[in-house]
Image: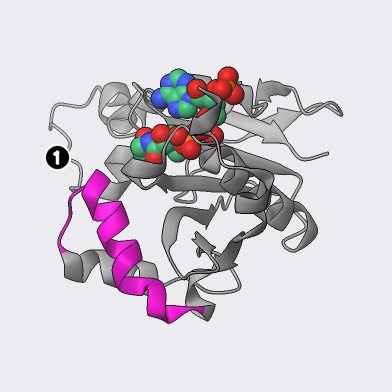
């Protein structure tokens, strides 16, 4: 079992860097992510090319031999300027279970705290709750990365408190229709980009961590 893990020496050869500073990793990063969540290469590359010093930012896990093992993207949460949303966390299949995911997330947290000066990290997951729990993340109400007015207050220990805008997330699309008693039916809601729908899916577990 122990042989599974990387030695201390191996970890010393790993580093987490900004993808936009190392564009030579763009293609392998695209393959790594698309291997897990298939999408057109063009769309994926365009999304990765948006990485910049301000959010969104893609961080990659590489070694001295220039192999890429992991990726993680940070996105702004408009209603929570002191936090960011971590998404597309992935470690290459053959390297899972060796603590590389833990290593990547720890470095990402350091970056968020020390470079971006953030106080919290939010994320959503479906199936990886145990991984994030072991890293200190706790379940919280859903957050939107699309400028919704939904926001929550946090006490000094970072525990999630009250919902400041009591709009159930599942009612966002049709709340106007539900309250309208007039004869004419309201027009159907505008279709939303798939990314918005994905972010607000209620079957995902939202988690957050206070960066201390
Ligand atoms: C989730 C993922 C990033 C974890 O990376 P990893 O390098 O395999 O994780 P680690 O080796 O650092 O694991 C740390 C701990 O979490 C546990 N863990 C990791 N993945 C887990 C899972 N899916 N379910 C339960 N526990 C998990 C490990 O057993 C380990 O526990 P231990 O400290 O008691 O030994 C990786 O499995 C992955 O890329 N998965 C596919 C993409 C994905 O689902 N990403 C998450 C999107 S929200």
Q: Is residue 186 left or right of residue 54?
A: left
- Look at the image and tell me whether residue 212 can be seen: yes
Q: Is residue 38 magenta?
A: yes
Q: Residue at x 32, y 42 (%)?
A: 93
Seen from the viewer's position, the closer of residues 188 and 68 is 68
Left or right: 12 as drawn, with respect to 145: right
Tell me the quarter of the picture where residue 209 sits.
top right
The coloring applied to the image is one colour
What range is drawn magenta here? 22-40
**What secondary structure predominates along the stretch shown in magenta?**
helix
Camera sees residue 165? no
Which residue sits at x=54%, y=35%?
A: 5
**48 or 181, which lies in front?**
48
Residue 198 among those drawn in magenta: no
Q: Where is residue 190 shown, x and y percent of the image?
A: 19, 48
User: Is 94 left or right of 43, judged from the image as shown?
Assistant: right
Query: Is disc 1 placed on a helix, strand or loop?
Result: loop
Q: Label 1, on which residue?
A: 188
Q: Position of residue 171 (x, y in %)?
A: 35, 25
Can you give x and y, in whole percent of width and height, for residue 47 in the image? Answer: 33, 66
User: Is residue 145 positioned above or below 208 on the image?
Assistant: below
Q: Quadrant of residue 64?
A: bottom right
Q: Nearer the viewer, residue 39 or 14?
A: 14
């Amino acid at each position: 079992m122990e042989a599974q893990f990387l030695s201390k020496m191996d970890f010393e050869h790993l580093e987490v860097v900004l993808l936009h500073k190392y564009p030579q990793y763009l293609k392998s990063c695209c393959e790594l992510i698309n291997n897990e969540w298939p999408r057109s290469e063009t769309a994926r590359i365009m999304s990765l090319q948006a990485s910049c010093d301000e959010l969104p930012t893609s961080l990659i896990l590489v070694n001295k031999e220039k192999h890429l093992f992991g990726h993680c993207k940070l996105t702004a949460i408009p209603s929570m300027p002191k936090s960011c949303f971590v998404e597309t966390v992935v470690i290459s299949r053959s390297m899972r279970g060796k603590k590389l995911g833990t290593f990547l997330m720890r470095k990402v947290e350091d970056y968020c705290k020390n470079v971006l000066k953030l106080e919290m990290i939010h994320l959503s997951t479906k199936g990886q709750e145990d991984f994030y729990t072991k890293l200190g993340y706790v379940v919280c109400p859903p957050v939107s990365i699309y400028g919704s007015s939904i926001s929550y207050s946090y006490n000094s220990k970072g525990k999630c408190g009250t919902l400041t805008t009591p709009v159930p997330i599942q009612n966002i699309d049709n709340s106007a229709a539900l309250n309208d008693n007039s004869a004419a039916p309201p027009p159907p809601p505008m279709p939303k980009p798939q990314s918005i729908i994905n972010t607000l899916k209620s079957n995902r577990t939202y988690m957050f961590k206070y960066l201390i």
